[in-house]
Image (cartoon, rainbow, N blue to C red):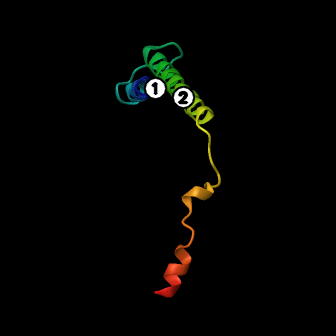
Amino acid sequence: MKTLSYSLVTVGMVLALGGVVAVFNFDQPSDVFSLAWWMIVTGWCLAYIGMGIDIVHVFRITKREPAYVFQPKTNTAEGVEGKIARM
């Protein structure tokens, strides 16, 4: 799922930047519904879809795994303070 998300974002950004470069460097028409315009719009759409998939994936992961704010008492070492003070 992450590979799909990152691939969509990467392809989308390449398309959007390619459209912008085509308008400025190759004197393509920047009119609405020209080829460069469609490249930019399609690139942004693909990038947003990829970001949305990634965000949904993150929310699914955080919903499944509980987050512990405090560590349980079993992880603390009791009695260590006394040994350190005697040395």
Asked if 76 appears above or below 36 in the picture, the reply is: below
Tell me whether the residue at label 2 lies in contact with that at label 1, contact meaning CB atoms closer than 8 angstroms: yes
Q: Amino acid at mark 2?
A: His
Q: Residue 5, which numbered label?
A: 1
Q: Residue at x 55, y 77 (%)?
A: 81
Residue that lies at the very extreme toward the left in this rendered image: 26
Residue type (three-letter) at the residue carrying disc 1: Ser
Quarter holding the N terminus is top left
Measured from the top left, where is residue 30 in percent x and y? 48, 21
Marking on residue 49:
none
* Residue nearest the viewer, comparing 18 with 47: 47
Name the element at disc 2.
Answer: helix
Alpha carbon separation for disc pair 2 and 1: 9 Å
The part of the image, by quadrant, that contains residue 61 is top right
Give the number of the mark in front: 2 or 1.
2
Residue 21 sits in quarter? top left
Mark toward the start of the polypeptide (2 vs 1): 1
Q: Position of residue 65 (x, y in %)?
A: 58, 37
Compared with residue 77, is residue 33 higher up or lower down, i.e. above or below? above
Which type of secondary structure does the marked residue at label 1 adopt? helix
Image coords of residue 5 (percent x, y): 46, 26
Q: Counting other residues with Cα less than 10 Å from the Cα at mark 2, is it few (<14), some (14-19), or many (20 or more)?
A: some
Disc 2 target residue: 57
Q: Residue at x 42, y 25 (%)?
A: 23
Q: Is residue 86 above or below residue 75?
A: below
